[in-house]
Amino acid sequence: MPVLKQHFFKLIALIQRNPGLVAIFGFASGLASFLLVERQAELARVLALVMLVSWLWLILENILRERIAQWFGFELPPPLLRYATQMIHQESLFFVLPFFFITTTWNSGQLLFSGLLASAALISIIDPLYYRWLAPKRWLFLAYHTLALFAVLLTALPIIFKLTTPQSYQLALAAAVLLSFPSLFTIITVQRWWRGLLLVGMTLAIGAGGWLARVWVPPATLWLTEVAVTSEFDNQNRAPGESIKQLSVAQLRSQGLFAYTAINAPRGLNERIYHVWRRDGGEVERIALDIHGGRKNGYRAWTHKKNFPTDAVGRWQVQVLTEAGQMIGVLRFKVVE
């Protein structure tokens, strides 16, 4: 046991002398996780499980400290716990960032969520911000913790349990709402009955707001690998013709249009998506498609639209959405006279 304690204190001393090592390790392991996830789904499950177990340890930190002191006869030093917490935040945020960055539709509201995650990751590697500004504010630190866990669950659940995007979002949101309760409890002290009702009401409001804001959250494990809006399609080889950015009404009515999307998804995942055809912002038609994960270049799905409104001139979009309404991507073209 003395040898173990000696190694712990050596680790603390090393981190204190080289605090940048934690940030470098977090970034490198997060980037490596993304690259390995692309190549080997089984290893992705292991990595995601390690992340979830580390989060469970963080949530039960005080209980585990007491048990370790009771079972092994020594208490974990606070500096070690602080650096471990920071490293978990770095690992988590840099693990999910590549997934969200590649799935974000940047000219949409998803920019806000991905930007928030990037800011949180930046804070985790800047010690003055993390220790002097974030950590002392208990409610803010818990909110930060909840955001990181929410992002990790959105990424890990489809990989580990093959849950659909709506199922993953619902479970991740439920966990985030549950963890937001302690944060709100530090702001609203329950001394009177109406304060208790306010606490419950605010918790439910966070859950409702999170569900309504789902259209701004990228689907972390689904992204487009190939897209095309085309008038020709090779059905035998499942290959689209040349992509079109602009066409006339006459061309549109004589040939119709194909919207082709190849969607990368985790192996074994079965998901329903929608091609939503829009003209000048208004929905014209919504077509359901079922995709299956595991193909390296993405699952190929397409819709063929022949019936267009009388006045088809305008700016068109084909939005690729999950069942929960999260945008995977968007295809654009213009119809002219």
Image (cartoon, helix red, strand yellow):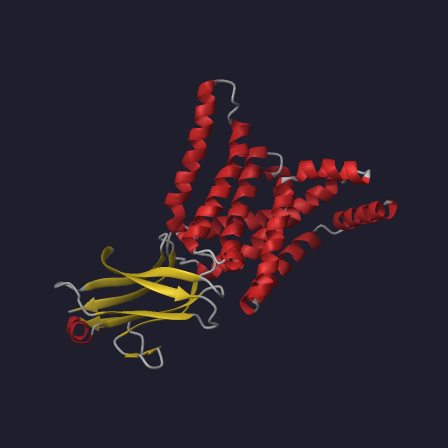
| Residue 197: image location, x then y, percent | 44, 25
Q: How many marks?
A: 0
Residue 111 is situated, as x and y percent measured from the top left of the image, at 42, 53
Q: For this view, does 144 lie left or right of residue 331? A: right
Quadrant of residue 140 within the rendered picture: top right
Q: In this rendering, would 232 be left or right of 21?
A: left
Taking the spot 69% from the left edge, 45% from the top edge, the residue there is 83
Residue 254 visible in the snapshot: yes
Residue placed furthest toward the top: 192
Residue 177 image offset from top left, x and y in percent: 48, 39
> Could you say which is closer to the camera, residue 154 or residue 115?
154
The quadrant of the rendering that contains the N terminus is top right
Q: State left or right for residue 79 relative to residue 143.
A: right
Q: Is residue 16 above or below residue 134?
A: below
Q: Furthest-right residue in view?
A: 2
* Vertical comparison of 220 with 205: above or below: below
Query: Relative to the observer, which residue lies in front, 111 or 43?
Result: 43
Residue at 85%, 47% (x, y): give it. 6
Given residues 66 and 85, the one toward you in this image is 66
Q: Is residue 314 positioned above or below 186 on the image? A: below
Residue 188: image location, x then y, percent: 51, 26
Q: Is residue 52 above or below residue 259?
A: above
Residue 229, quarter of picture: bottom left
The answer to whether residue 128 of the structure is visible from this angle is no
